[in-house]
Amino acid sequence: MTAVKERSCTTLFTTVVGVLAVFPSLGVSAVATPTPREPIAPISAPVDIDARKLSLGERLFHDPRMSADGRMSCATCHPLSEGGTDHRSHVVTVAGKELLLSTPTVFNSALSARHGWLGSVESFPKLLDQKIQDRFIFNSDWKQVEERLSQDSSYAISFQSIYGSRPTAAAVGDALAEFFQSLRTTESRFDRFLRGDEGALTEDEKAGYRQFKSHGCIACHQGVNVGGNVFQRLGVFEDYFAVRGVDETADIGRYLITGRERDRHVFRVPSLRNVAATPPYFHDGSALSLEDAVHVMVRFQLGQQPDEKDVQLIVKFLKSLTGYYQGKSL
Amino acid sequence: MNGERAIYVILGALAVALLTVSFLSTQTLDSEQHESINDSLREIRRIDALLNEQVLTTRYELQHSYDDIDVYAATLQQLMNSLRDSPILNFTDHRSELARAMSELNDTIVRKTTLLEDYKTDNALLKNSLQHLPHGVGTLAESGDSATLALAQDLLRDVLTYNLTGEGAIRQDVESEISALAMRAQRVPAKEQTNIGNLVTHAELALRLQPQLDATVEQLLKSPLETITTKLQSGYFAFYKSRIALSNNYRVALYILSTLLLILIVYFFIRLRVNTRELFKEKERALVTLHSIGDAVITTNANGAVMYLNPSAQLVTGWNDVEARGEPLNRVLQLMDEHSLKPLGSIVDRCLSEGRHVSLNEHTLLCRRDGQEFVVETTAAPIRDGDNAIVGSVVVIRDVTKTRSMARELQWHASHDPLTGLANRREFEHRLRVALQSARERGKTHALVYLDLDQFKVINDTCGHVAGDELLRQITGILQPALRGVDTLARLGGDEFGILLEDCNVDRARQVSDQIRLALKDYRFAWKHKVFSVGASIGIAQITRDSTSVDDILSAADMACYAAKDEGRNRVHVYASTDGDIAQRHGEMQWTTRITHALEENRFRLYVQRIRSTQQDDDDEDHYELLLRMIDERGEIIPPGAFIPAAERYNLMQSIDRWVVSTVCRQIRQIATTQSDIYSINLSGQSLSDDQFLAFVIQELTENSISAGTICFEITETAAIGNLQNAMKFINTLKAKGCRFSLDDFGMGLSSYAYLKNLPVDFLKIDGTFVKDMHDDPADRELVRSVNQIAHVIGIKTIAECVESEAVWNHVREIGVDYAQGFYVERPRLWLTPVSSRNFTAR
C-alpha cells in the first residue's frame, strides 16, 4: 500500500523524496511532487465522487429543514456563491445571538483534519452533530431532522435508493460529507505553478512566495490547505490582545477546550486557500484587507518589522491562491 | 397426568434454553474480524513508525508540511476507533487484561495526538526563528559593522549547531553571544538596533524552544505504542485461543445434545409406531368382538350423536352403520314405555349429564324403523378418556322379547291348569285371598262356589284318562259362559272346580249355581258309543267381613258341597254352620266309633311277617314284625291305612298301642317262645311321648315275665322327632331292660342322618318305596346302598322292606343289607287268635 524510502534523519535540511499514501477514507490525497519538495501541495480534483450522494448532499446543504425553525440551512452562513462564508466577524444568528468567531469558509474544509477556529472536532460527523444541536445554530436534534426529511417523499425515495433506509443521521452525514468532498477549489494559478507551470505566476507573485517562505510564514501556513493543520498562539512576539484592546471570551481560544495554560489564545492556523475571496481575517474578523492581515502577522507572529514592499509581494502571492469551483473563480 | 405434561414442557424448555445458550456461546470472531483486528494492530505499529519518521522529518527539514502528520494521526485515531468497535470488547470483561491494554492504547494515542499538536506548534515557531536568523544576519550584512556581523554569524552558527546537537556547551556559547549582541545593540543606530533586537529575540526564542521541543520529540519517539500493541496482540491471541477452545467445547456439547435429541426422537417414533400397531390390533379385536356379540351395541360421542352400531344394533334398530353415523341417538333408537307407549327421554342424555351408568330394564319397548317392536333392556354407560372426561357413551340393548314371553308362559303355567286352561288351585287361592282382603277392608261380599262332578270317576275308570280329560274340558266349556268376566273359574283338583263370584250376594250365587247345575243336568257326555249324564254337587260359601281365612272359606265350601252330595247329588247347598256335622257323620267321625267298637269287641287281629337274614340261610333267630288288622262289623279285614289316620287324629292310637302291647305280651307268654325269637311292635308317636305308656309297657313285660330281648319296638322317625326328649327317655329306659328298637320307614319323611346318629336304635328299616323298584331303578339302588353303608358305619343293622321278588332279594343281598322283609320272603299271616280280651278303651 505504501512505499516509504528509508532515509537518515541526521542530515540537516535534507530533502525528502517520498511518495505519500492516499487514504481514501479521509479523502485527503497527496500526489507525488517534483524535487525539491514544496511545503505546499496543490489541490487535486475530487475522485470517486458518487454523483447521487453529491446531489443529495447539495440539496441537504441548502435545506432549511435542518434547523428547528426551518429558516436556516448550511448555506445561510456558508453561501457557496460568496466564497463559502458570509464574511461576518460576529454573526447574528436567527436566535438573535452573536457568534463569537468569524465564519470560516466551507471550501476545501474537507482537506483538513480539524475544523473551526478551535479545532474542537476531529471528524465531519461530529462537526455536523455539533452544528445541528448548537442552540445558536440549528437548535434541533437528529430525531426532528430525520422526521422532517422523512415527510418529504422525494427525500424518502432518494435515501431509500442510495442507502436502503429512511433519512437517518448517518445517511445525512454521509451525503453531506460527500458533498463537502466536492467543495474544492482547484486550478488556482499557484497550484498550476506548483505543478510546473512557471508562467502561471507573475514574477512578483513568485517573489511574494519566496518572501512568504523566507519570512517564516510557511512554518505554519503549509500543506495542501496552506495552513489549517496546526495550532498557534496569536501574538507570539507581542501581546496581540493588549494592543487590540477589548477582552472577549472567544479570545481565550483553544484553552476553552483543553484547559491547558499553553493553549490560551491559541487558535487553529487558518487555511490561506482563497484568502483573497474570504475576508475579513482572523478569529475576530479584525483585519479587513490582506495587507492589514499580513502586517499583523509579520509583527505579532514573526517578530519582524513589516517591509511594505515585501508585504505587497506576499499579498500578490496570496491572491494567486484563489481557485475555481465549478469552473468559476471564487 | 397434568403434572407429567408440565414436566415434559419444562424439560423441553430447558433443552431449548440449553441449545440456545450453546449456540450463542459458539459465536466467535469470524476470520474476517479476526484478520481485521490483527491488521489494525499491525497497522497501528506501522503508522506509528511512519508518524515518528514524519516527526523527525518535519523537525529537521528546512521547510515542512504537517499534512502527513495529520493524516497519520487521523489514521491512528481511526484504527483505534475500529479496534474499539470490534467485537473483542463485547466478549471480554471490562476489567480483563485485554480491556485494560485497550484503554491504555487509547490513552497513549490521545496523549500522542496532544503531543503532536504541541510539537507542530513549537516546531513551527522554532523553524520560524531559525528561518529568520539567516534573514536577520543578511540584513546586518547590508547595513551593520563587521564586528556585529561576525558576532551575528557566530550566533547563527551556534544556534543551528545547538539546534542539531542540543549540547549544553554550545547553548552557553549562544547565551553569551546573545548578551554580547544585546550589549552591542546599545551602541548602534536605531535601525541597526531593531535588526539586532529582532535577531536576539529570535535567537532567544530558539534557545527557549529548543529543549522544550527536544523533550516533546523524545516523548513522541518514546511513546510505548509498540509495546502496548504487542501486549495487546498477545493478549488478544490468548483471548482468541480461549474463545476457540470454549466454542469447541460448546460445539461438542451441542453435538451431544443434538445426538441425544435425535435418539429420543427415533425412540419415540418407534414407540409411537409400536403403540399404533397395538392400538390398531386392539381396535380390530374390539370390533370383531362387537360384531360377534348378540347384544346390540351403539356408541355415541359426547353430544349424543351416533358413532357406531354393531350388526346386532343394526338389526334391532333397522339403521345401518353409515346412515346412523352422526344422527342423534333418539332418532336411531326409539324407546317407549311398554304400557303407555309414550317415548322415553334419551337415555344417553341422562347418562352423559349424570356421568354414570343408566339402565332402563323394565317395560321398555324398542320401535324399529319398520315399526316392529321389541321388548328390550337398555343400559348406557359413559366412556371416559385418560383425564376422566366424558368423551361419549356406549349403549347396550338386549332383546328380551323371547325371555319375556317365556317368563309369561311360565307364569301362566304356574297359575293355570294346563288341561283346561283354567286357573289352578294356587292361583285361585291367591284370588280368594285378594277377595277376602277386599271383603275385610271394604266390606264387600263375594261368593265361593265349590263344584264336584258326580260321574267323573265312573267315566275315568270305564273310558280311561283321555275321556276323563275330555270331559273336564267340555265341562269347562259349559261353565265358563255362565260366568261374568270378573268371576274366576278354577280347577281345584281331580273333578273339583271352584268359582269365585266377586261382588256377589248369596242369592245371586245361588242363582248362578242353579243355572250351572241345570246346564250340567241337561248335558250328556258321549264317548265311543256310550253316553253319560254328568251331574254336580255344588256348595256355596260366602266371603264376608267376618270370614276368617281362605282355608276356612274353602273348607266351608267343601263342606257345603259335601252336604249337597249328602242330600242326594245334583244339588246346590249354601254353607251353614251345621254342615260340619254332615261331614263328620260321613267321614272320620265314623272311624272313631268303629275303632272304639272294634277295641271293645276285640275285633283286631295281629299278623306276622318274617324278617329274614340275607346272609345266613339257616338263621338261628326268628325275627317277625307284627302287623295290625281290623275286622269290621261285616267281618271284612280292614288294612291299617284305612283306620290309623282316623285313630291318630282322634287320639285313639294309644288305646290301639296298649291293646297291641298287652296282646303280644300275653301271646308270647302263652306260646313260650325261644329266646332267639324277636317280635317287632309298631308304636305311634303319641304313645312314644306318653310317660304313662312307658310305665304300662314295663308293667306288661314284668307281669308276663317277658324276656325283654324278644321285644323290638318299631318307631318312625317322625314319631321320634315329634317329641325327641320323651322318645329318648322311652328308648333308653327300655333298651336298658333289653328291648330293641328299629327305625321304621327310613328314607321317607325327614330322614336325617344326624338324628339317626342320636337315636340309639338297633335296626334301620329302609323304606319299601326305595326297595321295591331296586332292580329297575339304579337311583333307588344307590340310595339303598348308601343308607346301608351309613347305617353300618354307625353300627346299626339294616332291614329292607317290600322285598317282593327274587331280583330285589338278590340286589339287597348283594348290597349287603342285613335283613329282608316282604312278599318274597314271606307273606304276612295271621299270628294267633287272641286268647282273651281286655277293655283298652278305658284308661
Image: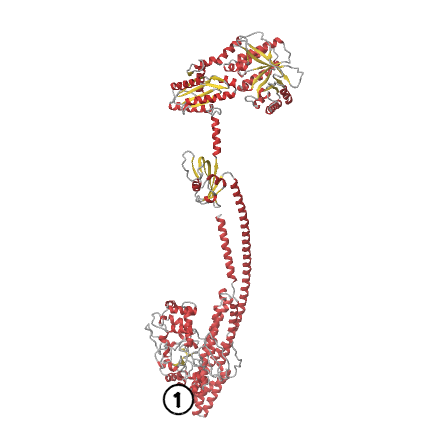
Q: Quadrant of residue B728?
A: top right
Q: Quadrant of residue B204?
A: bottom left
Task: Indicate the position of residue B630 as horizontal and vertical percent values.
Answer: 55, 11
Identify which residue, A47 or B735, lies in the foreground: A47
Q: Quadrant of residue B781?
A: top right
Identify which residue, B460 or A277, lies in the foreground: B460
Task: Name the side, left or right, on which B2 lies relative to A86.
Answer: right
Colour scheme of this structure image? secondary structure
Task: Indicate the position of residue B185 as horizontal and vertical percent values.
Answer: 42, 89
Neighbourhood count class around disc 1 (C-alpha, 10 Å): few under 14, some 14–19, many 20 upward: few
Q: Which residue is mark 1?
A: A309
Task: Name the side, left or right, on which B162 lies relative to B340.
Answer: right
Q: Amino acid at mark 1?
A: Lys
Identify which residue, B232 or B214, lies in the foreground: B232
Task: Indicate the position of residue B246 as horizontal and vertical percent values.
Answer: 54, 62
- Taking the spot 54% from the left edge, 54% from the top edge, the residue there is B265
Identify which residue, B661 or B248, lies in the foreground: B661
Give the structural element (helix, strand or loop) at label 1. Answer: helix
Outermost residue to the left: A96
The answer, for residue B203, to whether it is visible in the render is no
Task: Name the side, left or right, on which A89 lies relative to B289.
Answer: left
Task: Indicate the position of residue B306 as horizontal and vertical percent values.
Answer: 45, 43
Q: Chain of mark 1?
A: A
The answer, for residue B414, to whether it is visible in the render is yes
Outermost residue to the top: B836
Relative vertical location of residue B715 with respect to residue A234 in this rendering, above or below: above
